[in-house]
Image (tube, rainbow, N blue to C red):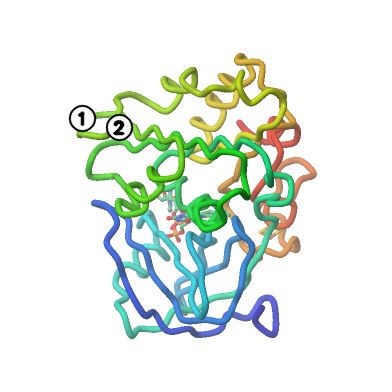
Amino acid sequence: MVDNVLTPSPYKIIKVTKESDSEYTYRVATDIVPEHGQFLQLSIPKIGEAPISVSAFGEGYLDFTIRPVGKVTDCIFNLEAGDTMFLRGPYGKGWPIDKFKGKNIVIVAGGTGVAPVRSLINEFYKNDGMAESVNLILGFKSEGGILFKDELEKWKEKFNTIYTLDNGVKEGFEQGMVTKHLDKLPLNKFSDNYEVIIVGPPVMMHFTALDFLNLNVPEEKIWVSFERKMSCGVGKCGHCRINETYVCTEGPVFNYTKAKTLLD
Ligand SMILES: Cc1cc2nc3c(=O)[nH]c(=O)nc-3n(C[C@H](O)[C@H](O)[C@H](O)COP(=O)(O)OP(=O)(O)OC[C@H]3O[C@@H](n4cnc5c(N)ncnc54)[C@H](O)[C@@H]3O)c2cc1C
Ligand code: FES
């Protein structure tokens, strides 16, 4: 954690990886150690800040996988290895790992939504037996939007995987949105011992959660991660507030019992 929670500090970008037609991963040299699912505020001096999830971390580095959609993320796209990036954090509540241990884990994620669960999936990959089973349904709009290609291949070795494209045909990929494939999950074999993680655009999370409820998955077993306009990131400014909930400090990871009151 940097000294003052609101003061960004400079860190060196050590690697930039093109993931897809529009997403790049920025590896930053730092000793910051986040929890899986937490985010940091990335900033460009005189431009602004953007909350970005940690997509991977290891000894001496953090990875951020970014899609350019506005003023800060567009500027980050002009940065290269050797340039400086300003960070503060980590912030928020990440995935409740202890709750996931020993369970059958279902992860349904779409597009850039795979970034906030990437480090969690790799944690399961590194630690055989941490989960009873890991079941991935990962969806991308089209071939050009596929992220983390090498890891998708690697995850197939240990996990039950369904990769799907909304549009287009590609070997190894199903067709259609992630919701089309939920009934392929062997939920009945998991008896009560499972948890479901959903990450993607709000509309995707909304309909995927409803489909799981229709499959008799209890609300308490569903977890989501929220993207919401933020400013301070530490519960002071109210930018991220939905009713009485501060997404920056109480989230971005929420159980569906709470998330259902926040999803539009
Ligand atoms: C916890 C969390 C984790 C996140 N993780 C990631 C991540 O891993 N990767 C990632 O890429 N993103 C992530 N995001 C989303 C990212 O923070 C936002 O996309 C952020 O707004 C980008 O900042 P920006 O300054 O580049 O964009 P902004 O300039 O804030 O623009 C954001 C959006 O608003 C629109 N917009 C901007 N100005 C206007 C205007 N005047 N009128 C109408 N529309 C406008 C833009 O078109 C764009 O769609 C995360 C968000 C949260 C809250
Ligand atoms: S972003 Fe300021 S209170 Fe959440």
Query: Disc 1 marks which amino acid?
Result: Gly
- Tell me which corner region of the image, top left, top right, bottom left or bottom right, holds residue 177: top left
Q: In the displayed structure, does residue 127 sit left or right of residue 241?
A: left
Q: Nearer the viewer, residue 164 or 234?
A: 164
Where residue 173 appears, as percent x and y from the top left, is 28, 32
Distance Cα–Cα, label 2 vs label 1: 6 Å
Residue furthest toward the front? Answer: 129
Residue 158: mark in rendering: none
Residue 216 pos. (x, y %) = 66, 16
Q: Is residue 224 above or below residue 32?
A: above
- Residue at the far right: name it: 244
Identified by mark 2, the residue type is Leu
SS for dot 1: loop
Q: Which residue is disc 2 drawn over?
A: 165
Question: Would you call the spot at circle 2 few (<14 residues within 10 Å), some (14-19), or many (20 or more)?
Answer: many
Point out the image quarter for the C terminus. top right
Position of residue 231 in the picture relative to residue 159 (left or right): right
Q: Position of residue 148 (x, y in %)?
A: 34, 53
Give residue 238's quadrant in the image: bottom right
Residue at image x 80%, y 44%? 244
Q: Are marks 2 and 1 in contact (CB under 8 Å)?
A: yes
Circle 1 residue:
168
Foreground: 21 or 95?
95
199 up-or-down from 50: above or below: above
The N terminus - image quarter: bottom right
| Label 2, ligand 1: CB separation under 8 Å | no
Residue found at x 49% / y 71%: 62
